[in-house]
Structure formats: C-alpha cells, structure tokens
Amino acid sequence: MLVSDRRRFLRSSAAAALSLAVPPDLFAQAASVSAPSSANWDAGGLRHLLPTVSDTRMLIKTSFSTPLTEAPTLSVGGTSVRGRMGDTRGEHWHFYVTDLKPRHRYTLSLAGAKARPLCEPWELATFPDPNERTDKFRLLIYTCGGGHEVHKFLPTAVRNRLLRRGLGFQPDAVVANGDQVYWDLWRP
C-alpha cells in the first residue's frame, strides 16, 4: 500500500469516527438530501434481504414476517431456484444461484405458493470477470446496519436514509460489514 493510500484511508477513518459524534437528528437531516426513494418498493411480507454476489454466483438470504409453509422460488433472469429453509419455522430462506454472466444486471423476483409474488422484483448485478480490467470501481462500505433502537442504535429510519444517501452515489458494489440482523438480542 502506498503512503498516500494510507493517508487517504486514515483521513476517511477519522471522518467516519467523527461522524459517530454527530447527533442522530443532524445525521437524519443531512442524509435525506437527494437520497433515492425506495418508499414505493413493495416488500410484501419480506423482512430482510441480504444479497452476496461474485462474478458468476449469487447467494440471497431472506426472512419473512410470517413463516412460509412451502419453499419459495427465486427467479434470476431465466433461472429459477427453490429456496432452502434456514430455520425450523419457515421464516428464513436462502437461495444459491450459479452459472451467471459476469458484469451483468439481473432482475430478481421471489414467489411463494402457486407462484404468488412475495415482494416486488428488484435488480442486482454480478461483478466483472476477475481477469477483466475495469476503468473505475466505486465501492460503498458500511457497518452495523442492524440493531434495535432500544440498545442505543441509530433509529432504523436514520440508518435507512444514510444507506440510501450512499446508494445515491451509484456504487458498483456495497459491502455491509458487521451484524445485520440482531435476533439474539430478543431471545431469552
């Protein structure tokens, strides 16, 4: 790593640390500026959607507000994958999709019993081929997107606006580090 890269990293880290000292209501005001709106996207009964991609594969983890009695199906382009249950109640499901094209934007959709849509379709792209040289690559990294407000986390609405603000810069990829779902905080 070059010295200038280290300095840029330290500057960015210092800015991120300073942002922790800013009051949440001030963050909420700043984050709402030109943030893309996802308020019209119909999540249906979908509670969480956690995607992971590579150049040729996708792993999609989902959870629903109410348990599903039958395995849902994820459609990615022309490929359909039956979900695998990730718990004992049918609330959490995951989908592993392979043989996708590198650097390609796909439309994804989730369907339940009798092909009933579980949420509105959305888009997700694969990474470029590892041997391909790209002209630019914009990366958004954030941490600790989950957590309940009772435990002194920023309110969900504020975290949502911050993420939408970051997405407004149209990153090529987003890395969400840390815990995203804090189910264990509410278990005895």
Image (spheres, grey):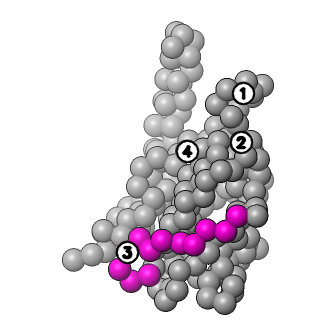
| Amino acid residing under circle 3 | Asp
Mark 4 or mark 2: which is in front?
2
How far is the residue under mark 4 from the one under mark 2? Answer: 18 Å
Instruction: Provide the residue span drawn in magenta.
Output: 79-90
Mark 1 to mark 3 CA distance (whole Å): 39 Å
Q: For the residues marked 4 and 1, what is the alpha-carbon distance in whole angstroms? A: 21 Å
Q: What element carries label 4?
A: strand
Question: Where does label 3 land, which residue?
Answer: 87
Foreground disc of the pair 4, 1: 1
Picture quarter containing residue 103?
Answer: top right
Asked if the residue at tag 1 contacts the one at tag 2, i.e. Cβ–Cβ closer than 8 Å, the answer is: yes
Q: Of helix, strand and loop, which one carries label 3?
A: loop
Q: Distance between the residues labelled 2 and 1?
A: 10 Å
- Please give the residue where the numbered disc 1 appears in the rendered image: 132
Name, please, the residue furthest toward the left: 188
Residue 1 placement (x, y as % from top left):
51, 14
**Mark linked to residue 102:** 2
Q: From where the camera sits, is residue 91 visible?
A: yes
Amino acid type for the residue under numbered disc 1: Glu
